[in-house]
Image (cartoon, rainbow, N blue to C red):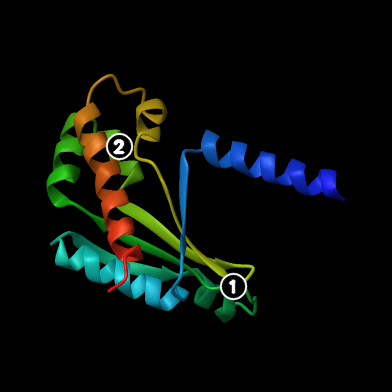
Amino acid sequence: MKFTIIALIVFSAFTAKSQNLTIYRSERSVDETVDRLVEIIKKKKLAYFETVAHDKVAQEYGVKIPPTRMILFEDPNLMIELVSCRQTTALDLPMKILVWEENEDVYIGFFDPKVMKKRFLLQECEDIITSMSRLKIRVVNEALKDG
């Protein structure tokens, strides 16, 4: 049993790293975390599109899953620069942040935009992608602060 748990932890860490998945733990509930993230996105004058409540959609189909919310937003200036650089990058837009509950803990996660370099075979756009990555980190870190 102990080996299975260790193997699962190692596999999970490898999978998250290979996918460039960044995960933070929140001390707030899913709803409070989502509200805080949306508040910060709007305060930064970013384009907020919507929050998709995957758990509520599942419930409409008779399936119960733990709270799982996807926040869709973008920085219009970075989007314009990125899509101007390579149009196919629009497939990864708008930016997304996932908030979910797992084993009574709440997590915030997102894919690092740097994965686009491999996915779209980009030799250019480095500064834009780095700016998008930093933006996601700043939004999440602000949301995790007390206040």
Mark nearer the N terminus (1 vs 2): 1
Q: Quadrant of residue 122?
A: top left
Q: Secondary structure at mark 1?
A: loop
Left or right side of 83 for 107: right
Closest to the observer, 35 or 115: 35
Residue at image point 34% right, 39% down: 113
Q: Secondary structure at mark 2?
A: helix
Q: CA distance from mark 1 to mark 2?
A: 31 Å
Q: Quadrant of residue 66?
A: bottom right
Pointer 2: residues within 10 angstroms few (<14), some, or many (20+)?
some
- Residue 8 rendering spot, x and y as whole percentages: 73, 45
Q: In the rendered image of this protein, does residue 122 appear above or below residue 87?
A: above
The amino acid on which the numbered mark 2 sits, given as a three-letter code, is: Thr
Number of marks in picture: 2
Q: In the rendered image of this protein, does residue 89 appear above or below residue 51?
A: above
Q: Residue furthest front?
A: 146
Left or right side of 93 for 82: left
- Residue 139 rendering spot, x and y as whole percentages: 27, 57
Pointer 1: residues within 10 angstroms few (<14), some, or many (20+)?
some
Q: Which mark is residue 4?
A: none
Q: In the rendered image of this protein, does residue 103 appear above or below residue 140?
A: below
Q: Which mark is residue 89?
A: 2
- Residue 53 rendering spot, x and y as whole percentages: 45, 72
The amino acid on which the numbered mark 1 sits, given as a three-letter code, is: Pro
Instruction: From the image, tell me which residue sits under label 1.
Output: 66
Of tags 1 and 2, which is closer to the observer? Answer: 1
Left or right side of 112 for 14: right
- Residue 125 rendering spot, x and y as whole percentages: 22, 28
Residue at image point 33% right, 75% down: 35
Residue at image point 77% right, 49% down: 5
Closest to the observer, 118 or 137: 137
Left or right side of 130 for 77: left
